[in-house]
Amino acid sequence: MNCRANLKGGGRLYKILGKKELAHNTVCQLEVEAPRIARKARPGQFVVLRVNETGERIPLTMADTDPSAGTINLIFQVVGKSTALLGTLNVGDAITDIIGPLGKPSHIENLGTVICVGGGTGIAVIYPITKAYKEAGNHVIAIIGSRTKDLLILEEEMRAASHDLRVTTDDGSYGHHGFVTDVLRQILDERRDVKLVVGIGPVLMMKFVSKLTKEYGVKTVVSLNPIMVDATGMCGACRVTVGGQTRFCCVDGPDFDGHEVDFDELVKRQRAYLTEEKMAMDRFMTMGE
Amino acid sequence: MLDNKERLKIPRQKMPEQEPEVRAKNFSEVPFGYTPELARLEADRCLQCKKPKCIAGCPVEIDIPAFIQLISDGDFVEAARKLKERNSLPAVCGRVCPQEDQCEMVCVVGRKHEPVAIGRLERFAADWERGNGEVFIPEKAPSTGKRVAVVGSGPGGLTLAGDLILKGHEVTIFEALHKPGGVLIYGIPEFRLPKDIVQAEVNYLERLGVKIEVNCVIGKIETVDELLQEYDAVFLGLGAGLPQFLNVPGENLSGIYSANEYLTRANLMKAYLFPEYDTPIARGRNVAVFGGGNVAMDAARTALRLGADEVRIIYRRTRAEMPARIEEIQHAEEEGVQFHLLTAPIGFFGNDDGWVTGIECLRMELGEPDESGRRRPIPIKGSEFKLECDLAVVAIGAGANPLLTTTTPGLELNQRGYIVADPETGKTSKEGVWAGGDIVTGSATVILAMGAGRKAANSIHEYLMNKPEKRAPSSPTRMTAAR
């Protein structure tokens, strides 16, 4: 493990107070001490963190915050070196840098009926938004999906955060056998009163959710997760095309109108460092650094 | 004692530096700096004018003849202290100031000969002091109990913090990134400004008592209004911070970076040390850099050091209009950077993976001068041609980042989104708030930001000493502090 002592200028520590594996070896939840961020964060906002002194800056959405305890809740899937390294930290360890809250908060209002669709670790991102829509007085239907039952996260939390929860798995090991879009289509066929769909998950899922809702003419918001560096609008690494315009996801987003997003470009931009990511992961698995 | 005739006979001393073919493959600093012998020889070229022009040529009005005399006398530590009376970052300025447009431009020796190498001497004295562990911590004025918040730890904020802490105020700097230094850390490459030097300057301020809070994006974690509840004055030195793109088709292909992103990856994140450091950076073989400023030169030279076979600077005017320092252009050229002048990009091509493979360009000719005073480039009809590239860096300037300004009610901005501030004091339209540097002027130089920090520090000091008490007096020495 490669975690240094983490005394920052100003004496701030981002200490890990709790750790839970949500899916064995893949999805992990950390409760991290970050009182100022916890106090300010709103649903939909994210943080950028750097695990250690040699780490890269990666954006992660806050699944929850507890302002009174001064903690934020981060849920992540191990997909590469940085998340693997983050996963090696335990209670009592600290994260070197956490910057936030970043991005615009989700725009929450009372619209009537809202469907919140979460896929994979996107469920962690949509959870606080789902909760907020319910608190704002909406009738909230939630659809969550994963590849297989073992990877499904936050089922109970999502059930509590919504009025009606539907579950799908790609392999049929739990809930509906198929994709979130199957269930979404079913609901959209049944009900004409859906005012908004919020879809958060893998880019392809968001693309197909948006394609589907466009057929039904239902407004759709997606939360994008491109590669970022500073995440304050300074570098443009996270540029996405929305409605033919280049936008910076870190400051203009992360929420955008799903019907306007160029998802194909986003997929390609997310894959820009595949070779380097694989090299870093292989090195981490063999050398531990 | 030498007489003036003898002094004028001494040629301007060159700084020893790495050979171009060697340095183009490493990130170590290019010049080695003067030896004490070279420094004294160069210092002897100064005529010690009775009415020196150089002081007025310096944005922070360093007593240039005095510090050069001290070098000539061999009292290098005192020379550094003389510099620090006016300039808290001499090791930085000695490296990155455009002296040829400032002090050295008006140097009397320069009328008939080459001017005294003021910048190189400044660098020498500052390095000597630091290298010999002679950094002197001046005595601070007694505490005033007043608190100042500084947003941004670039050259403007660091200068202001250094001035105000010495005057007895409490100073806290808020930095958005995880390391202090602003453009000195994320922007200017290691081979031009070693990061140890920036770190040493920051350490010096911390030893003086300046508090630095990294990872604080003001406008997000705290607003300026919230800072004003806790602090008696706020200085906004956040930099320009918004990359400009070309706005041509294909610009969102992978492998096309803003200069900010490319340099931040390389410098702040140390991507040139990947995989020891985790941040990746695309290593192009055939690199195109758009722009003609210092940032474009930095990006081009970084690309060479990351292993590129060919690096082209693509600029739509001619060499005469390039805003980069001559020294930077020369360094780039010696290292093998090619210049494609009077050329403008009009679009990019990519492959199926969405990676850039080439640029469509147009040839230009120069027309009448535009509002910048430079001759306007005009496209030549039918002159389209293609250039191959597998990496492109857009270094055509910056705009005003709206993150802080749009969350600060009552702060007057100009049409381009920059903060309106009094050029003499840095005072903004908002009570208790000052601003300076690139967020006021648009992209400029390190020394101009420092000059703005200095002026704002004076104005803030005056304001604080006349400001009625907001809270209970916290220090018995308060009354003696106003001096």
Image (cartoon, rainbow, N blue to C red):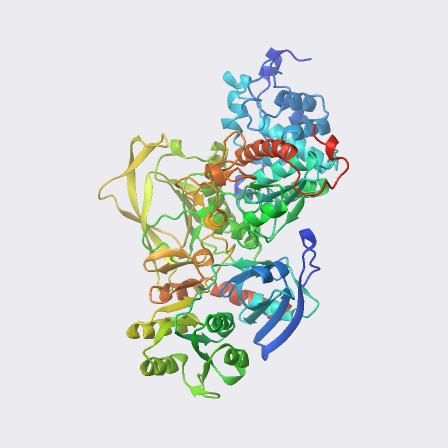
Q: Where in the figure is residue B65, as x and y percent of width and height?
A: 63, 20
Place residue A88 in its image quadrant.
Answer: bottom right
Left or right: residue A33 compared with residue B417: right
Q: Where in the figure is residue A42, as x and y percent of width and height?
A: 52, 63
The answer to whether one can see residue B98 in this image is yes
Q: Which of B452 and B404 is in front in this view?
A: B404
Q: Which of B121 and B145 is in front in this view?
A: B145
The answer to whether one can see residue B33 in this image is no
* Image quadrant in which the N terminus of chain B is located: top right
Left or right: residue A24 compared with residue B284: right
* Image quadrant in which the C terminus of chain B is located: top right
Left or right: residue A3 compared with residue A242: right
Residue drawn at (76%, 35%) of the image: B477
Q: Where in the figure is residue A71, as x and y percent of width and height?
A: 63, 65
Q: Is residue B139 above or below residue A190?
A: above
Q: Where in the figure is residue B328, as x and y percent of width and height?
A: 49, 36
Q: Nearer the viewer, residue B190 or A86?
A: A86
Q: In this view, does B434 lie above or below A38?
A: above
